[in-house]
């Protein structure tokens, strides 16, 4: 059984699939405590669902794109079985992970969105840097930035691991802490080949916390 916080149909607010309708499976539980977490409600609780029950829920929506998110999906071992089952049902599956677990457990065909934690998150010590070499074609790397210092740190990691030569790299500002315009100017000044990434679901539904 998997602990599920919510299953819903919305507009994808993140990743390169941003803007497309998607089904979201938000699993409950997280091993990190990021300073800017916007899904605190998913850290605990959740309702038990079997893999088959989740897939049947997903099938009710008119969409083949599915994002498994959290919380931290890879905390729950049955996430792998869920992803495999969804793939077998011809869904396009992506998993958003905080980067502290080995992503090699994910089945071939899953798009991985790897969140590399910055110092501003207060969880950068939990990054499993081996995950970078476990990524495959089509996977993406995301940095959530709280300050200019976070930007400089992320820029250095991008260069150190040649990330933009290998993957789509997303720089996402915590808008209450780092103005998007400031981040944009830094990216332009440094000619950094990353994608400025804003959470558009928060622009569309600024007053909604769940189900978006």
Image (spheres, grey):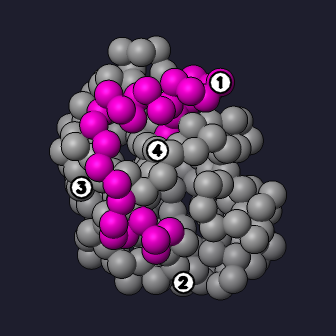
Rate crowding at label 4 as few (under 14), some (14 to 19) or many (20 or more) other CA atoms within 10 Å: many
Q: Between tags 3 and 2, which lies in front? A: 3
Give the labeled residue for mark 1. 62
Instruction: Decide: is 61 above or below 152.
Output: above
Which of the numbered marks, if any, corresponds to residue 75? 3
Mark positioned earlier in the residue sequence (2 or 1): 1
Q: Quadrant of the C terminus?
A: bottom right
Q: Of the residues tagged 2 and 1, which is closer to the observer?
A: 1
| Above or below for 187 versus 110 | below
| Marks 3 & 4, CB-CB < 8 Å contact | no
In what element is the residue under mark 4?
Answer: strand
In the rendered image, residue 195, in percent from the top left (x then y), is placed at 66, 52
Left or right side of 60 for 103: left
Looking at the image, tell me whether mark 4 or mark 2 is earlier in sequence order. Answer: 4
Viewer-proximal residue among 45 and 209: 45
Dot 3: within a 10 Å radius of its alpha carbon, few (fewer than 14), some, or many (20 or more) residues? some
Q: Marks 3 and 4, Cα distance to the nearest angstrom?
A: 14 Å
Q: What's the CA distance linking mark 3 and mark 2?
A: 30 Å
Q: Label 2 vs label 1: CA separation?
A: 42 Å
Task: Judge depth for marks 4 and 2 and give the one in front.
Answer: 4
Q: CA distance from mark 4 to mark 1?
A: 15 Å
Query: Callout 2: 10 Å neighbours few (<14), some, many (20+)?
Result: few
Q: Which residue is mark 4?
A: 25
Task: Identify the residue position indicated by label 2 in the image.
Answer: 149
- Percent across and percent down for residue 174 are 63, 75
Find the magenta span and give its range: 39-67
Give the mark nearer the N terminus: 4 vs 1: 4
Separation of disc 3 and disc 1 at Cα? Answer: 28 Å
């Amino acid at each position: 059984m998997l602990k599920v916080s919510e299953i819903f149909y919305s507009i994808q607010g993140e990743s390169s699939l941003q803007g497309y309708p998607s089904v979201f499976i938000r699993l409950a539980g997280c091993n990190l405590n990021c300073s800017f977490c916007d899904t605190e409600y998913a850290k605990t609780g959740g309702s038990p669902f079997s893999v088959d029950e989740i897939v049947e829920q997903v099938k009710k929506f008119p969409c083949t794109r599915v994002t498994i998110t959290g919380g931290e999906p890879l905390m729950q071992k049955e996430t792998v079985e869920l992803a495999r089952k969804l793939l077998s049902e011809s869904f396009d599956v992506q998993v958003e992970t905080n980067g502290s677990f080995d992503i090699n457990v994910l089945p071939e065909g899953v798009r991985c969105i790897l969140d590399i934690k910055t110092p501003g998150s207060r969880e950068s010590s939990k990054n499993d840097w081996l995950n970078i070499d476990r990524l495959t074609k089509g996977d993406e790397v995301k940095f959530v930035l709280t300050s200019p210092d976070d930007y400089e740190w992320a820029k250095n990691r991008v260069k150190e691991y040649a990330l933009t030569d290998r993957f789509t790299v997303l720089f996402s500002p915590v808008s209450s802490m780092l103005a998007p315009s400031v981040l944009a100017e830094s990216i332009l000044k440094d000619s950094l080949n990353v994608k400025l990434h804003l959470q558009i679901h928060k622009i569309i539904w600024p007053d909604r916390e769940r189900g978006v």
